[in-house]
């Protein structure tokens, strides 16, 4: 047992004594199957699991935020949240500070620096707003306060399991980790499973730390996109010219490039700028001046694996273009 894990074991033992019968989620009717799984499949001590759950608390604001996500807004309102001059300037400054690291990540993973910068900007204002919720609280709220048959409850339970495993693997205290209302953490807002699968030690200090190391955060975002299919040098999206008789059934049909550029052109959605024949999806967004039409290409939909939203992918793309343009003007 490592020194860090020995300290955690002592901590949990103390909590188990102090928290027995104290409430929390240790005695929640749906907690026992989770406890049994952590013991039987992952070798956790039951008292340790109970001690952690006993300290977790329901967060009503988590439920409220989940029921009113930013992605439920129209594009006209959504873009005002993320496409601001302050966030643009922050991106230029972050790129200036971490230019060498961003260039290395682009070389190794094929993801453009501006996309990495933009995701960090959209997610946490370049590390300035990583979230103040205890992650264990957000996850137990999702796991045990939503109907067990809905996706959100399954998500919470799955991520709670990953949080326990992550804390053991990294020697972290799960009762101290903070993040967003959804349970996402660090500069890039990785949920626990994404942290375990995609976070990388990009600064070479022996640990993947996405809370305190912007270098690790940059490498981790690049690795995430690469592992989810990012194509080096591939375009992201282009505006579409729409024919009067365009087939509306192809619009926003799936969060994937489920057609071809030529096929969409035949259905009334022609690329407004030159683009090679490739997989694409027709996207409609409700903008400030009415409907906007775009062809989302492969990399556009890779961005949606980070957040399952066309609005999110467009915000990341447009902020990346603005940051890149402003940086080029300043150089």
Image (cartoon, rainbow, N blue to C red):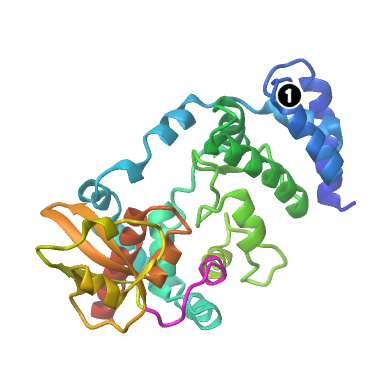
Give the overall secondary structure of the magenta segment.
loop
Membership of 231 in magenta stretch: yes
- Name the residue at 57% across, 62% down: 213
Q: Quadrant of residue 151?
A: top right
Q: Can residue 94 be seen in the rendering of this structure?
A: no
231, above or below 27, in the image:
below
Q: Nearer the viewer, residue 30 or 45?
A: 30
- Residue 37, given in percent of the width and then of the height, sits at 79, 38
Q: Nearer the viewer, residue 232 or 189?
A: 232
Identify the secondary structure beneath mark 1: loop
The residue carrying mark 1 is 26
Q: Which residues are magenta?
A: 224-234
Q: Nearer the viewer, residue 179 or 159?
A: 159
- Residue 271, given in percent of the width and then of the height, sits at 21, 75
- Residue 175, given in percent of the width and then of the height, sits at 67, 37
Q: Residue furthest right?
A: 1
- Residue 60, given in percent of the width and then of the height, sits at 48, 24
Q: Is residue 325 left or right of residue 222?
A: left
Membership of 157 in magenta stretch: no
């Amino acid at each position: 047992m490592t020194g860090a894990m020995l300290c955690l074991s002592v901590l949990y033992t103390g909590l188990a004594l102090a928290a027995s019968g104290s409430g929390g989620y240790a005695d929640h009717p749906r907690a026992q199957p989770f406890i049994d799984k952590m013991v039987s499949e992952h070798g956790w001590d039951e008292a340790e699991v109970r001690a952690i759950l006993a300290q977790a608390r329901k967060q009503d604001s988590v439920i409220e935020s989940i029921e009113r996500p930013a992605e439920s807004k129209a594009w006209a309102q959504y873009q005002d949240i993320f496409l601001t001059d302050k966030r643009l300037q922050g991106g230029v400054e972050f790129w200036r500070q971490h230019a060498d690291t961003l260039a290395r990540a682009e070389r190794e993973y094929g993801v453009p620096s501006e996309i990495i910068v933009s995701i960090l900007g959209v997610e946490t204002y370049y590390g300035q707003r990583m979230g103040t919720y205890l992650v264990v609280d957000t996850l137990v709220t999702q796991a045990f306060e939503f109907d067990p048959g809905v996706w959100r409850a399954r998500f919470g339970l799955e991520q709670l399991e990953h949080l326990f495993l992550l804390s053991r693997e990294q020697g972290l205290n799960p009762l101290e980790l903070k993040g967003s209302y959804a349970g996402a953490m660090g500069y890039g807002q990785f949920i626990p499973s994404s942290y375990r699968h995609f976070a990388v030690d990009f600064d070479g200090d022996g640990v993947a730390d996405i809370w305190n190391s912007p270098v690790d955060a940059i490498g981790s975002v690049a690795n995430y996109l690469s592992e989810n299919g990012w194509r080096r040098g591939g375009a992201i999206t282009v505006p579409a010219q729409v024919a009067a008789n365009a087939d509306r059934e192809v619009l926003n049909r799936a969060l994937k490039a489920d057609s071809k550029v030529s096929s969409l052109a035949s259905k009334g959605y022609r690329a407004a700028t030159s683009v090679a024949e490739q997989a694409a999806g027709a996207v409609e967004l409700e903008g400030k001046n009415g409907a906007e039409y775009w062809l989302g290409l492969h990399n556009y939909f890779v961005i949606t694996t980070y957040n399952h939203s066309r609005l999110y992918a467009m915000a990341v793309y447009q902020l990346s273009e603005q940051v890149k343009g402003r940086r080029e003007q300043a150089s």
